[in-house]
Amino acid sequence: MKIKSTFIRHDSDDETMLIPTGNESFSGLVRGNKTMGAIIDLLAEDTTEDAVVKAMMDKYDAPEDKIRADVCKVIESLKQVGALDD
């Protein structure tokens, strides 16, 4: 899975936003913190949920279950707005 090329990322202070362009059915924006931004960075290339979790565990000192929950939440949000190519 990876972020569709029709979505662009924008960072502002401590906030990350993902904005659709072109012919997407979703016309809002997805807002989140720097953790979401790190997950979106990892989703710029085709990857798996497990690979994202592992990369986040390498980057952050947190329990695996917490990181996995955060990754799952972001991925689910991105799927709901159609921002991911499976």
Image (tube, grey):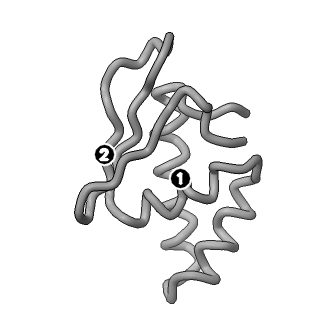
The Cα atoms of the two marked residues, 1 and 2, are separated by: 12 Å
Residue denoted by label 2: 31
Q: Quadrant of residue 19?
A: top left
Q: Residue at x 44, y 58 (%)?
A: 37
Element type at mark 1:
helix
Say if 75 sits above or below 52 in the image: above
Residue 77 position (above or below residue 43): above
**Residue located 48% across and 15% down the image:** 22
Question: Left or right: 44 with respect to 70?
Answer: right
In percent of width and height, residue 12 lies at 26, 56
- Report the disc number at residue 23: none
Which of the numbered marks, if any, corresponds to residue 40?
Answer: 1
Identify the mark nearer the N-term, 1 or 2.
2
- The answer to whether 22 is drawn above or below residue 84 in the figure is above
Q: Quadrant of the C terminus?
A: top right
The image shows residue 69 at horizontal and vertical percentages of 51, 62
Three-letter residue code for mark 2: Arg
* Image location of residue 80, percent across then percent down: 48, 29
Amino acid type, mark 1: Ile
Taking the image as shown, residue 84 lies to the left or right of residue 7, namely right
Q: Secondary structure at mark 2?
A: strand
